[in-house]
Image: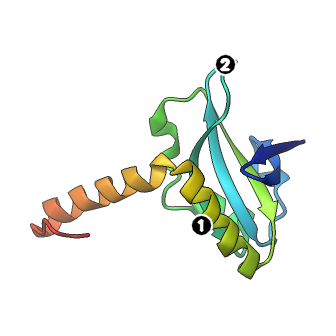
Amino acid sequence: MTIRIGEYKFDGPYWDTRDIHAWCSGVYVILGKDGGTSWEVLDIADCKHLREFIETNNRRYLWPRFGHREIAVAVLYVTQGTREKILKELRAIYDPPCGELLNKTWGEHLVKSTGLRNWT
């Protein structure tokens, strides 16, 4: 099963991370959708070991916050130099909401815990 994201053909979407090669490098895209709607890009990242990173990602608790009934992941197995290029390209196209929410959440945490307001 494959899904086109940008100009790339990703494997997936997968609902179970055990379907992802554990020690492979690449780019992953977290997707969300409701019923018959199209997939929406929630998060994009690259890493050296895809399955481990997805399962332990510090943003994983944010993915359900967008209210989608289904959340899945698509992966593209590529080397480090290639994955950095693809990551930048896809983030520019899709502007995933997870990064923005993480920055807002982290900023609010810093204000509450340290009193700092200009954290960016």
Q: Residue furthest bottom?
A: 81
Considering the numbered disc 2 on the image, is that residue within a helix, a strand or a loop? loop
- Taking depth in this image into account, of 90 and 107 the one nearest to the observer is 90
Considering the numbered disc 1 on the image, is that residue within a helix, a strand or a loop? helix
Q: Within the image, what quadrant is residue 115 found in?
A: bottom left
**Residue 50 x %, y %:** 73, 65
Residue 19 higher or lower than 110, as above or below: above
- Taking depth in this image into account, of 98 and 113 the one nearest to the observer is 98
Graded by Cα atoms within 10 Å as few (under 14), some (14 to 19) or many (20 or more), the crowding at tag 2 reads few
Residue 66 higher or lower than 56, as above or below: above
- Taking depth in this image into account, of 95 and 114 the one nearest to the observer is 95
Graded by Cα atoms within 10 Å as few (under 14), some (14 to 19) or many (20 or more), the crowding at tag 1 reads few
Name the residue rendered at 45%, 38% in the picture. Answer: 65
**Residue 61 x %, y %:** 48, 49
Name the residue rendered at 51%, 51% in the picture. Answer: 95
**Residue 16 x %, y %:** 76, 45
Name the residue rendered at 25%, 61% in the picture. Answer: 107
Question: For the N terminus, which image quadrant?
Answer: top right
Look at label 1 and name its amino acid.
Answer: Lys
Judging by the rendered image, the residue that carries numbered circle 1 is 88
Q: Position of 101 compared to 43: left or right?
A: left
Q: Residue furthest top?
A: 36
Q: Within the image, what quadrant is residue 41 found in?
A: top right
Look at label 2 and name its amino acid.
Answer: Gly
Give me the C-alpha separation between circle 1 and circle 2. Answer: 30 Å
Judging by the rendered image, the residue that carries numbered circle 2 is 35
Q: Residue furthest left?
A: 115
Q: Position of 97 compared to 111: left or right?
A: right
Sequence order check: which comes first, mark 1 or mark 2?
2
**Residue 30 x %, y %:** 63, 48
Q: How many marks?
A: 2
